[in-house]
Image: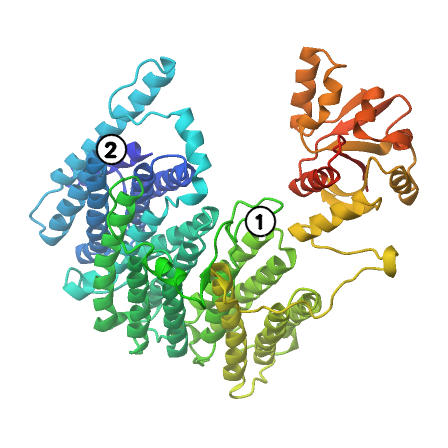
């Protein structure tokens, strides 16, 4: 998709003096945005499978097309009317991508990525010529068009090389084409969790957002206005994507940082967009920014485990929040704009170092491992060793734990409403971005990540609270409800209060910290309720937000400490009410969390001793018994009131456990059986002496029909793990469970 976008810009630049324009601004913008979306999708799909250089280049080009495309749409719709407006809108993005593409080009030359380096240098030089063209109206756009034409030609060469490689059945490979290698792809998948390819694009879009305010500080632009919102909006959405993909790479700290930075970019974009509605500058709430600086500071301390360079980089963002808080007009003051210049330089250096170190043998020193080695020699501290705490012991999840970011967003959203707003113009105080993005969007993202990890209750809490902020944040602080107050306005928030009350009850069975978090959130809901009926006491918001923010900050700090250190630990507390099960003594029916290794061991022990259990499987819950326990198998039949015995199946955990069948089956049929079972298919096998190898004895009478029995391998890690534990603990020939679907 880089080829058509570059070709469009080349044609547009060559015909810039033509009246009317060969390609109208609106059409050019729509096409660029379309190609940018497709290129971003391709870049994110290639992460962890292609080289980091290709991923970074693809996503950077997509980000550039997004910004230019949206600005061209604004020109076509009459939002940007003068040449000065177009100059102020384009200059920050061109200054940023001049640096970003130059970094990619340098790394490409050093790491033999010649085609990518050539295209990156061409785009960087076109951005330089574009800056010169907008600064001096006497300069033409031919140089810009020429560089984009170079990108088009190189892209055509790469497309031709791929096509020739494919149609020649991998016999003809043109030089420098970086053709796909199936073996390399699989090896890349094997190390995927160890590498985070999208960090570089996150740093490059940080350069873009810092450039918007840094250009104002150094005099490259004359004003901050709505024409620069596309760059900030693009940066915010890209950093949100980097946050999600960092969880996919099991990089929890990096995901938290880019979640924080995306919140900042949305707020900066909102502040510039507000000036499109009103001429005055919006006011930034001081308590929120102070708390945000503290969160950046705490996260920087834990980033020391990765590298000292990351610590210094995050401290710049803490300083930026402090600089914005020092003056009511926030980002429009020169102090915060000066810090933006420092962030621009630091982001460029970090992008260069991280992109180069991903593939280089001799790496650029970033202070990696210094603090980690220091902590290993300190008695009170012990870092986590061995298995990653974000990887589940049983079950499977493609994402790291997102609870740290979820609790941090609760802190931000709570302190955002500490400062009062003018009821005549609630949008004049920058509150909406903190509520909608931090309290809403990011909490829903954390809830979905928690759901993928099997944390149903935690995900329900995050998602409910996220929707509450998204719906009622704009209603109260966006002026949607207007002056109307009363019970009719409050009905919706009453529903949220009831739903949160149900979650408070269920957190009694989870932990003390989660119970307090849900319980104190009722104070926030009550605040919205009192405001809806126009009965909010003075000072209530301050007290409520301090309580909720303190509890959420404790949960945030506990998540960071417990995921980083084995000692010390910050306790979350056990469940207030414990489910011990029904019955007494040996007849107690236990309730155990399925995703804990200790629980699966207890279940395996019960089955080994002739018990009956109900466990999760790939198609619901199933009633199970060890197949060498005839009494237990009979209990399965009688407990579920089976209409027919054929409903009872035998499940095994892997193909090697069916070796007793091999002597009874011909070669090709055995391969068919293996293929069918490997994809969780069901096989009906005639009963015979091979059942004796599983030590069934009298239990065989209850298995399947009179002449055959159903075999299957469940597609559920928990079920197969239980089967393996039962077989390993018994240390006998049989390795199977009889399973009844419930």
Q: Considering only order in the chain, which callout, 2 or 1, is on the residue closer to the N terminus?
A: 2
Q: Is residue 170 shown above or below 414?
A: above
278 or 740, nearer to the observer: 740
Kindly indicate the quadrant of the structure image that contains residue 142. top left
Does the rendering let one see residue 266? no
| Image point (26%, 60%), residue name | 210
Q: Which residue is mark 2?
A: 113
The mark lying in front, picked from 1 and 2, is: 1
| Image point (23%, 36%), residue name | 111
Which quadrant is the N terminus positioned in?
top left
x and y, in percent, of residue 185 in the image = 42, 30
Q: Is residue 52 shown above or below 304?
A: above
Q: Which residue is mark 1?
A: 392
Dot 1: few (<14), some (14–19), or many (≥20) neighbours within 10 Å?
some
Q: Secondary structure at mark 2?
A: loop
* Distance CA(mark 1)–CA(mark 2): 37 Å
x and y, in percent, of residue 458 in the image = 61, 60
Q: Secondary structure at mark 1?
A: loop
| Image point (70%, 48%), residue name | 600
335 or 701, nearer to the observer: 701
Spot the residue most to the bottom: 538
């Amino acid at each position: 998709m880089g080829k058509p976008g570059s070709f469009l810009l080349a044609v547009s630049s060559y015909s810039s003096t033509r009246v009317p324009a060969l390609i109208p601004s609106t059409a050019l913008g729509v096409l660029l945005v379309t190609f940018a979306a497709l290129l971003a999708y391709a870049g994110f799909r290639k992460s962890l499978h292609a080289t980091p250089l290709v991923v970074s280049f693809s996503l950077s080009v997509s980000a550039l097309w997004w910004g230019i495309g949206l600005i061209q749409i604004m020109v076509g719709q009459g939002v940007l009317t003068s040449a000065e407006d177009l100059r102020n809108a384009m200059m920050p993005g061109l200054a940023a991508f001049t640096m970003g593409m130059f970094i990619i080009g340098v790394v490409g030359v050093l790491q033999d990525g010649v085609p990518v380096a050539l295209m990156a240098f061409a785009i960087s030089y076109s951005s330089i010529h574009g800056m010169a063209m907008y600064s001096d109206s006497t300069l033409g756009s031919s140089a810009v068009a020429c560089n984009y034409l170079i990108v088009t030609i190189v892209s055509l060469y790469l497309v031709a090389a791929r096509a020739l490689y494919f149609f020649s059945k991998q016999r003809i490979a043109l030089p420098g084409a970086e053709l796909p290698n199936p073996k390399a792809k699989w090896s890349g998948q094997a190390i995927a969790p160890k590498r985070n390819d999208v960090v570089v694009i996150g740093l490059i879009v940080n350069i873009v957002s810092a450039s918007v305010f840094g250009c104002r500080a150094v005099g490259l632009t004359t004003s901050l206005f709505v024409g620069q919102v596309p760059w900030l909006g693009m940066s915010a959405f890209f950093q949100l994507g980097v946050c999600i993909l960092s969880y996919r790479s099991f990089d929890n700290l990096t995901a938290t940082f880019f979640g924080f930075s995306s919140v900042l970019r949305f707020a900066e974009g909102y502040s510039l967009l507000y000036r499109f509605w009103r001429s005055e500058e919006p006011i930034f709430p001081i308590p929120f920014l102070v708390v945000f600086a503290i969160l950046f500071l705490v996260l920087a301390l834990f980033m020391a485990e990765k590298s000292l360079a990351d610590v210094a980089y995050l401290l710049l963002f803490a300083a930026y929040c402090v600089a914005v808080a020092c003056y009511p007009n926030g980002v429009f003051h020169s102090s915060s704009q000066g810090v933006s210049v420092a962030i621009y330089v630091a982001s460029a250096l970090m992008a260069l170092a991280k992109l180069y170190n991903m593939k280089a043998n001799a790496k650029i020193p970033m202070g990696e491992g210094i603090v980690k080695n220091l902590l290993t020699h300190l008695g009170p501290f012990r870092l986590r060793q061995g298995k990653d705490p974000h990887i589940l012991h049983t079950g499977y999840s493609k994402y790291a734990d997102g609870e740290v970011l979820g609790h941090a967003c609760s802190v931000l959203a709570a302190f955002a409403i500490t400062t009062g707003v003018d009821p005549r113009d609630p949008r004049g105080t920058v509150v909406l971005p903190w509520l909608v993005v931090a309290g809403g969007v990011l909490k829903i993202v954390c809830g979905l990540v928690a759901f993928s990890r099997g944390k149903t209750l935690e995900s329900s809490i995050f998602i409910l609270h996220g929707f509450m902020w998204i719906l009622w944040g704009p209603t109260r602080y966006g002026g949607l409800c207007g002056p109307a107050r009363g019970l009719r306005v409050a009905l919706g928030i009453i529903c949220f209060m009831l739903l949160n009350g149900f979650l408070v009850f269920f957190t009694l069975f989870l932990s003390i910290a989660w119970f307090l978090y849900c319980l104190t959130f009722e104070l926030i809901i009550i605040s919205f309720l009192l405001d809806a009926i126009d009965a909010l006491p003075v000072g209530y918001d301050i007290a409520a937000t301090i309580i909720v923010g303190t509890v959420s900050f404790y949960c945030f700090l506990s998540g960071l400490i417990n995921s980083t250190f084995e000692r010390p630990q910050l306790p979350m507390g056990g469940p207030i009410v414990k489910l011990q099960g029904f019955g007494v003594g040996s007849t107690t029916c236990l309730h155990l969390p399925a995703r804990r290794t200790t629980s699966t061991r207890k279940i395996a022990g019960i089955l080994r001793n002739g018990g009956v259990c109900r466990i999760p499987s790939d198609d619901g819950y199933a009633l199970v018994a060890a197949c060498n326990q005839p009494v237990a198998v009979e209990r399965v039949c009688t407990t579920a009131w089976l209409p027919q015995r054929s409903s009872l199946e035998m499940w095994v955990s892997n193909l090697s456990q069916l070796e007793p069948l091999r002597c009874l089956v011909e070669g090709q049929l055995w391969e068919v059986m293996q293929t069918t079972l490997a994809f969780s298919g069901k096989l009906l096998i005639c009963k015979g002496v091979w059942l004796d190898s599983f030590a069934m004895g009298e239990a065989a009478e209850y298995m399947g029909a009179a002449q055959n029995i159903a075999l299957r391998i469940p597609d559920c890690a928990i079920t197969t793990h239980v089967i393996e534990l039962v077989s390993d603990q018994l240390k006998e020939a049989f390795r199977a469970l009889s399973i009844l679907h419930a």
